[in-house]
Amino acid sequence: MTRLLTALVCAVCLTAPALRAQDSAFYAVSYVETAAPAAKDATAALRAYRDTTLKQDGCAAVDAFEQIGRPGHWVIVETWRDQKAFDARDAGLQQRFVDGTRSIRVSGFDQRPYKTISVAPARPGANGNSVSVISHVDVAPNPAVAPMLTRLAQASREEAGNLRFDVLQHTMRGNHFTVIETWRDQASLDAHVAAAHTKQYRDDVLPLTGSPLDERVFKAAR
């Protein structure tokens, strides 16, 4: 019994840091629009911003997406160890991106802060056919929404074609959530949309929404 108790305590000690690391992760989600004919220049600028930002202490990932069917509409998702690491970053990198794209941008650089609701490691397998969905879920304040989105994420990750399913919550507006999904191909996304757990989620969340679900399909900017 004593050995079992010791093993359980050790397991908690080993897993707790990982849980705390996920809970404290900070996400900066940015939106920017460039002129459609300047997509090549915008992609190069985004790549340079990603590469330099990834060298910053505490930056775990920088993912850029371009909306399918609307060239020049970009979303940048930065993952940081915690908000302290984000605050300590070289903010000049972002300013240089903003200044360097001034001639091709048709919008400002709109950045929003987020925290973890449900995040899991992405699966390998992304390719030129992969598609991503970034959704904005605005609801009347309700404690049922975060668990609802967590259940959706957990069920969706079990689907064969899912590569990523993350749920984030705005750090200052608790009634706003952003969902980031990546699917192996369009067929995998179509199967997810028709899945029973997806339909159930939409039925459950609909009465709580303050605006229609905003779901947009993207491709990774490479």
Image: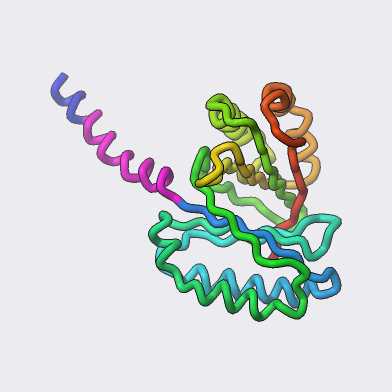
Depth order, front residue of 138/53: 138
Q: Position of residue 124 (x, y in %)?
A: 60, 51
Query: Total label count?
Result: 0
Of all residues shown, which one is farthest toward the top? 1
> As displayed, is residue 33 above or below residue 5?
below
Q: How is the protein colored in the picture?
A: rainbow
State yes or no: residue 8 in magenta. yes
Q: Quick one: quadrant of the N terminus?
A: top left
Q: Residue at x 63, y 31 (%)?
A: 140
Q: Is residue 130 above or below residue 15?
A: below
Left or right of residue 164: residue 40? right
Residue at figure coordinates x 50%, y 72% from the top left:
91
Q: In the figure, residue 71 lies in which quadrant?
A: bottom right
Asked if residue 171 is among those painted magenta in the image, a careful observer would answer: no
Q: Let me know if residue 196 appears in the view.
A: no
Residue 141: x and y in percent read 58, 31
- For the question of whether residue 134 can be seen, the reply is yes
The span picked out in magenta is 7-25
* Residue positioned most to the left: 2
Residue 189 position within the rendered picture, expressed as x and y whole percent measured from the top left: 76, 40
Q: Quadrant of the C terminus?
A: bottom right
Q: Is residue 216 above or below residue 73?
A: above
> In front: 127, or 118?
118
Residue 183 position by quadrant: top right
- Residue 63 position (above or below residue 34): above
Give the overall secondary structure of the magenta segment: helix
Image spot of residue 6 (x, y percent): 18, 29
The structure residue drawn at horizontal position 54% and vertical position 53%, both measured from the top left corner, is 113
